[in-house]
Amino acid sequence: MDAGYKLLAAKYLRKQAKMLREQFEGVRAAEDIEFVHHARVASRRLRSGLKVFGECFKPAELKSWTKAIRRITAEMGDARDKDVQIEYLRAALRTIPKEECFAGISRLLVHFEYYREEMQRYVVKAINRLRSGGELKSLEKACKKIQARAASNHIDVQSRYSFARAEFHVAGRLEELLACEKCLSRSDDAPAHHVMRIAAKRLRYTLEIVRPIYAGRLDFALAIAKRVQTLLGEVHDCDVWQDQLDEFATEEHDRLCALYGHGQLFAKLDRGLQYLREDRRRRREQAFAELLVLWRQTKEQGLWEELTRAVRTRRNEVPHPPEAAAENFPEERAAETSAAATGEPPAAKPASKSNGNGSASARDAEAALNDPHFKPPRKKPRHHRKRAAVT
């Protein structure tokens, strides 16, 4: 496996793991919602990083880390979404123009606050599980080991293999986003807009991951992807609001009917709910209009094509390594050179494992340099290789 690419992986993943771990006490205290926000972002970036750099680690470790991070991302995501909704309702109560809307909004706020308190124990449980499981500590340890080895051998993250893999991942994420473009002609296609939001998020995180090797050359695309994700996120949030307001209205109407035998009192609450519906509808229209303008400007200026050229050009600027093999650590190349000089076969190395996203073989590394869209083949299971050897 290319040492520069492994170093890039270690630096990014270790940084995000540290960021996630630093939020734990604040999340447990539940006194500032920003701790949950930062923990959610760090866990999302970790998941994206593990997908991009999966070939740099053993499959068993990768599976364990991914599973643990996925769990905490889900809990942090739900908690963060509810925190944002609560903040919106509190702001609405401070600026509400009609006093008759107060009852419905305040009733919904109480409902959400109670629900968020119930969620907190699951959030704490997720943190305790991640701590006791040791997956985060194991990930940081593996990354620290890679960094220490790279430092002693003066490894640089800007290798041809790093650029080739960066080009492959960026191109794939950009293709996913552009494939969703048609849904922008349908302002009411909420499911498709949600898919596009996820594609924009993935492109953004991928650009953040490879950003260190491009020295700011991709910052323009990163800013666009972030803005597209933000606007699509607002559109999605407004769609979620409409569904939740309808659900809450039905529940409240049924509750009041059960208590008083009629639903006349619901009209007092419904005024506030209608106000929220209209406010979220207007904000959705505004965010979608801003998105259309941004997307049109991006297309007219050819910025997505510029992104493609930027990642391809940078790879071609890096000179080819002296040999076709991946840029292994110097001591590994020295051992091979010594063996060739003495006429003896080089010492056997432990078989490198692959998770299906990449390979450590020299042939695969060379192919990746020549074709950034190359996908290394999955190795045969060990028992197949043994059977062939016996035969």
Image (cartoon, helix red, strand yellow):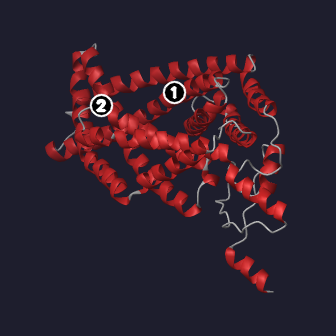
Of all residues, the one furthest to the top in this rendering is 97
Q: How many marks?
A: 2
Residue for badge 1: 230
Residue 378 spot, x, y in % from top left: 72, 63
Residue 263: image quadrant is: top left
103, above or below 133, in the image: above
Quadrant of the image occupied by residue 102: top left
Q: Describe the element under mark 2 as helix, strand or loop.
A: helix
The amino acid marked with disc number 2 is Ile
The residue under label 2 is: 86
Identity of the residue drawn at 76% across and 30% down: 314
Quarter of the rendering occupied by the C terminus:
bottom right
Q: Amino acid at mark 1?
A: Thr
Q: Is residue 204 left or right of residue 68?
A: right
Mark 1 vs mark 2, CA separation in Å: 19 Å
Question: 10 Å neighbourhood of mark 2: few (<14), some, or many (≥20)?
Answer: some
The residue at the point 73 percent across, 54 percent down is 334
Vertical side of 158 occupied by 299: above or below: above
Q: Nearer the viewer, residue 379 or 229?
A: 379
Q: Is residue 391 left or right of residue 106?
A: right
**Residue 44 visible, this orientation:** no
Give residue 150's position: percent from left, percent from top. Answer: 60, 45
Residue 54: percent from the left, percent from the top? 61, 52
Residue placed furthest toward the left:
260
Residue that extends furthest to the front in the rendered view of this protein: 342
Whether residue 322 is visible, yes or no, is: yes
| Residue drawn 49% across the image and 43% down it | 14
Sequence-wise, the earlier of marks 1 and 2 is 2
Q: Nearer the viewer, mark 1 or mark 2?
A: 1
